[in-house]
Image: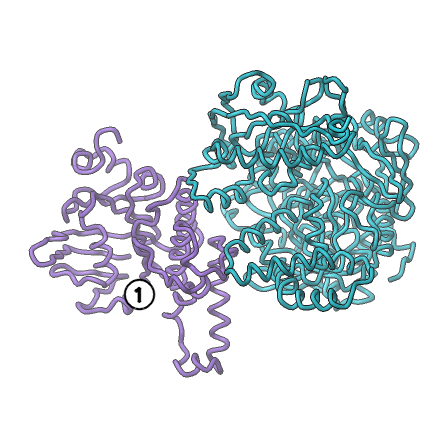
Amino acid sequence: MLQAQHIDLAFGAVQALSDVSVDIAPGEILAIIGPNGAGKTSLLNVINGMYYPQGGRIVFQGVERGKRLRPYQVARQGIARTFQNVALFKGMSTLDNLMVGRTLHVRSSFLSQALYWGRALKEEQAHRTYVEQIIDFLGIQAIRKTPVGKLPYGMQKRVELGRALAAEPTLLLLDEPMAGMSVEEKEDMSRFILDIREELGITCVLIEHDMSVVMDISDRVVVLDYGVKIADGTPDAVRTDPRVIEAYLGVSS
Amino acid sequence: MSHDSSLDTFPKLLLDRARRHPDKIAMREKDLGIWQVWTWRQMSDEVRALACGLAAMGLARGDKVAIIGDNRPQLYWAMVAAQCLGGVPVPLYQDAVAEEMQFVLEHAETRFAVVEDQEQVDKLLAVKERCPQLETIIYDDPRGLRHYHDPCLHAFTAVQEQGRRFDSAHPDSFEEHIAQGHGSDLAVILYTSGTTGRPKGVMLSFDNVIITSRHAISREGLRDNEEILAYLPMAWVGDHIFSYGQFYCAGFTVNCPESSATILQDLHEIGPTYFFAPPRIWENILTTVMIRMEDAAWLKRQMFHFCMRVAQRVGTRKLAGQSVGLLDTLLYALGHVLIYGPLKDKLGLGRIRLAYIAGEAIGPEIFTFYRSLGINVKQLYGMTEASVFVCVQPDGEVRPDTVGTPMPEVEVNISPEGEVLFRSPGVFLGYYKNPQATAETLDHGWVHSGDAGYIDAHGHLKIIDRARDVSRLDDANCSLFAPRYLENKLKFSPFIKEAVVYGQERPCVGAFINIDLEAVGNWAERRGLAYTSYTDLAARPEVYDLIQGEIARVNASLADDPQMAGAQIRRFLILHKELDPDDGELTRTRKVRRRFVAEKYATLAEALYGSEDRVTVETQVVFEDGRSGTLKAELLIRDVAAKTPFAVAQG
């Protein structure tokens, strides 16, 4: 689905990524793991279009990406993401935040939206129906009207996931979706990620530190260390790879 | 509304209403954010399709159909669809675990099950081998079931499709089946949740439910434009009467909430006119209001307390139709605009014309709080074996300490031992496959309720306690010990969620207390007390002080009643975990399983009557996903002074 080939990314003297190549197959759940500072979020940002790599290229669905594609243009192609620190609009309700996620698919003009007439009426209904289905999928009916800032952290992450889903992506990038969650919340989130792949057919790439989650739900694991890819394979293969054990996992994994 | 005696079953009532007012709204369900609507005509069509589908799948007269799930229109349709063919619905508690369900499914010999979603399907599949009669499981919500290939599973919509084909091939069979039903037929089996031993299957006929519903409708003046919220378990007889029996007899509208988490919001959106809630829900609402008021600005707090004082003085009199002075009327009207109106609207209680409380005694302060706001809430006494209604308080005679006068055609008597007996057209047919229990309870049409009570000077029934739980203390006066009475008094305090008292053949009364996490947590936060968990909060000396104060107040109230003065609580401890149905300590309707708790916490009970002031305990708990673990804690035990009764002090 997406191939990142020989990506080089540097910030001044700091080499964030060196010759990193990752293949993402359609319908798979790919986990990117590695110690802090390994370049995981940077890799996601490159895929997302937020950083422009100094070297290498991105091929998405068979088409090489132009050098200067803006993030919203990348999103239009069907790539959505969540952020490590929840990036929701805290003062808006859950429903409004999810509706914001539909912005990409709005066809009517600014004027008709502002005056709420003509095409905008039907569109609003269609978008609302879609968002309600996402609300049903994630089970967040009870917090539909709650301002997001009042929600507990685990719920905010779920709403963030919902907003990413609202964009109707084919590829979903999740940056530490389980950070700071209790065991029950992690189980819920894992179930959602699996359901997203099963029922919605969306490919998922997730950065995650919780090894039990990674080993449990991912089809393939990519390991980064100091900007270099040191392993790429099934969870079992990666778990026993000596370089991965030394760099990150430790002996009793 | 016509009380046509030929309409003696629910299928007949359904067809009659679909014919007389096809476009009136029968049911609503909130789905995808909006209230979806079914008219009587549409509902009748859905039921017809389902019934024909069940017929095509071989549902025969007398077959039992299990119904499991939250309140969903599809499940209510399944009940009447089964009845159309002469089948008998057996609703189960949706939060029961697989083992509990297995007992009922096997005992009732259910062949079919109509369930809500994957969660229920999983439970049934887990126990299916031990329920040999169970052949077919029909599910409504397909989410998560895409990869289930068990041949016994069928989608609700698929069954209806098959039904429509069957209907076209056999056009008159639907009406013919319905015509074969009679009022004396078995209509439903409701398994009681069982405070002692295994659940028993109460068999109710159509006559039981319909006649009782009609009497209640006419005595209480219910109309066909009532709006109710169906949120209580379908397995419970109360929901069966309100959302099913009275629904068909009166023709009002039943609204199903979106999910169990959104009930309060849906209550607010619907604004029901006819409402029932057990005491703990009324208590929870009041606790929430009080907590929120403490957060409000000074002016609003003052307004609230002033208006509530007016309401205390005036509101109950107004509701009873008694005369009120001019100044008071004006003040109350002002209060309505400022406080009562907006508050009731916010809670969703603004349009209530009739509300019932039943199940346990309610604290008098809570009772008067709601009545003073102008909400016509009344006490009701009933049980599954009576098709609910035994006694109801008439308008104008509502007091916190009685349960009212007998309903039409209900006779109430007190046995020489003080047990309440009743006889009515609503009395059940018997316990399914349990003739011994039936013989113990039913005696020439009279039901032994198991409750101790008496008729007071105004002709109202007063309930003291469960008859078999009433006993004597082993003290100088052989004082009366009525545990439920004491526990209810303790639970009137907002800080105490649950209480279990000991006293039978003991020198004094001791109590286990469960604190209310929300109320006590809020109290603790306001005093800057940090706590990490329920167990931590429950162990704090400051919380013990708080509870001790509450118990001292209860003791003072007991001291005023010569019968109860000897039963003041002398020792207590606060439990480290909440009593939970999943651990078997409470029934699914949250009644304490006294004997089970006594066994499980035997060491604590001994320590309560020992000389130590603390005890270590280790308990097994069952988490919501069925796994078990152990919880260890050290509990303090405190003494409480008894208040000397006034009469004794004088003498």
Give the quarter of the figure containing the N terminus of chain A. bottom left
Whole-percent x and y of residue B469? Answer: 74, 26
Image quadrant in which the C terminus of chain A is located: top left
Residue B9 left/right relative to A121: right
Q: How is the image coloured?
A: by chain
Quick check: A208 above or below B440? below
B420 displayed left or right of B146: right
The percent coordinates of residue B441 (x first, y second) are 84, 30
Q: Residue at x 47, y 60 (%)?
A: A146
Residue B81 lies, in percent from the top left, at 74, 51
Q: Which chain is cyan?
A: B
Q: Nearer the viewer, residue B308 or B649?
A: B649
Q: Report the front residue among B322 and B42.
A: B322
Which residue matches tag 1?
A: A75
- Visible residue check, residue B133: no
Three-letter code for the amino acid on which mark 1 is drawn? Ala
- Residue B265 makes an appearance in the image: yes
Which of the 4 quarters of the picture holds residue A212?
top left
Is B555 or A108 nearer to us in this picture? B555
Q: Residue at x 48, y 31 (%)?
A: B539
- Colour of chain A, in one word, is purple
Q: Residue at x 55, y 55 (%)?
A: B293
